Image (tube, coloured by chain):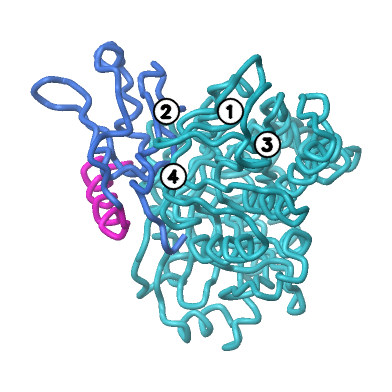
Amino acid sequence: MDINYNADSIIVGAGPAGISAALEIARAGKRVVLIERSPHPGAKNMYGGSVYTHALKEILKEDFDLIKYERIITSHTWSFLNEKGSFEMTYNNNDSTASYAVKRFNLEKQLIEIAKKRGVYYIPNTLVKELLVQNGTVYGVKTELEEYYAPVTILADGVNSLLARKINLRSDFKPQDMILSVKEAIKLDKKTIEERFNLKEDCSNGVNKQYFGTNFGYLKCIKNLFMMTFLYTFKDTLMLGVGANLGDLTKNKININFVIDEVKKHPDIAPLIKGGETIEYSAHLIPEGGFKKMPKLVTNGAIIVGDAAGFINSVHFEGTNFALMSGKYAGETAVSALDSGTYTEQVLSAYVKKLENSFILKDLYSYRNIIERLHSRSNSLSVYYPNKIAELFEIITDANCISKASQIRKYMFDFLKERGLREVVKDMFAFSKCGADVFFGK
Amino acid sequence: MQNDKENSKSIQNKLSTVKYNCDDSTHLIVSQEKCAKCKDKTCTYICPAGVYSVDENTGEIVVQYENCLECGACRIACPKHAIDWNYPHAGCGVIFKNN
């Protein structure tokens, strides 16, 4: 193609994936343009609350120490909610530095500063309307005002990736392939948060809680709602959010705001946020289709990264690490393509190879059926077992002067009777398959 | 169960915490023709910002695009594929700061 390129690479979207790709390309001395529709980087983005530092270190290298966070997340709790309370498991690692609680508005701002310092040409406030394509090759982008031309375009335009759909790299998602999440940033004073969550003043520790179960408040009237709740401690803010399968919300005609309002009333959650003031409400989609709904990742002259490619492991709340590392691999691929002077799909497929050899496609492959399996047993996970666990612990802790043997026998008998052998077998089958998927995964 | 009035009041309260650079035209275009045939009106209950409602007089869908949080749920959930969903103009729309 006879085109007067004005950059070596164009990146659409300044989230973690886009910035990571841009940094990689700029470090190799190429001219890279990073276009963002928002006036402030990160202002359109939302996540639970923490960025993973293993990936961040790989991307930022010596600049990693510049990153300021609000707290280090050192404590993870998995909690199963029922009507009266919860059953919780907590893993504390006070030495962990694996994840930082930092607001996206601040994270992307810092990443952009580093990227600019490393030679990335950053253009905010600019909306890419479409990709420029000729003879099946992407050769640039068209913004509201002008056109930019480059041999390699990287689509880091997030979960809704309108651009990837426009050039048919991806079919549209179905509601059941998406999680709709809303979050409230709840302001509390720093000292109160530290007292409530047993945290140090120097912000060197912090808490992430993941709550399962819907059998409380009005949520128990909803059938088969596959959802979870998350809570993160920031410096003087708590991030409380819920994510629910969009298909389930649609079928049940439930608004996600109703879900978070019910969660806020739960007897175990209400005291944690008591006295706090919601200072921001946000919403975002999370792609859950994973491996099976993955778009075509490369075409002539273009590569897809991050959320736009659906790179998420929602079982383990991983997303920023997938975004950062896929951006890096795309950047490396773009650099080799630029050095070789060919930008065909075949050359850019080196990106797919890199993904295949990394945790990204390995994990997506291993987890390809897990969400579906868990979703199919959502009533067991959200209602039945949280209740049954609570009943068991009631027997253990109630000191009710009834013989333990008779209570345990009754418990087991009731379990088989109410639940029915069929359901128990289905549950066991689904859960052990999940385990096997990972164990025998890539 | 979900009380629609209470929920929409709750949403309105929360939206008052959100900062926007308001666009001068809508980025969400619904096909009123398709919407007229839609029984579910999924958009009216799925949107976390309560952007969509039904006009009591005309029966048409009213779109308060100014409140949009740009999540994209409506576009995917709409059974009639009746929502032409775009981003607001450059620099416009929601600005999350405590995200």
Numbered label tally: 4
- For discs 1 and 3, the disc positioned in front in the rendered view: 1
- For discs 2 and 3, the disc positioned in front in the rendered view: 2
Q: Farthest residue to the left: give it.
A: B57
Q: Is residue A126 above or below residue A4?
A: below
A73 sits to left or right of B91: right
The residue identified by callout 2 is: B75
Closest to the observer, A101 or A58: A58
- For discs 4 and 2, the disc positioned in front in the rendered view: 4
Pointer 2 indicates a residue of which chain? B
Q: Residue at x 68, y 56 (%)?
A: A407
What residue span does the magenta drawing correspond to? B1-20
Q: Does residue B6 show up magenta in the picture?
A: yes
Q: Which chain is blue in the picture?
A: B
Q: What residue type is labelled 4?
A: Thr
The residue identified by callout 3 is: A371
Badge 4 element: loop
Badge 3 element: helix
The residue identified by callout 4 is: A126
Q: Choose top left, top right, bottom left or bottom right for residue A306.
A: top right
Q: Is residue A281 above or below residue A366?
A: below
Q: What residue type is labelled 3?
A: Ile
Badge 2 element: helix
Question: Is mark 4 in CB contact (under 8 Å) with mark 1?
Answer: no
A358 sits to left or right of B71: right
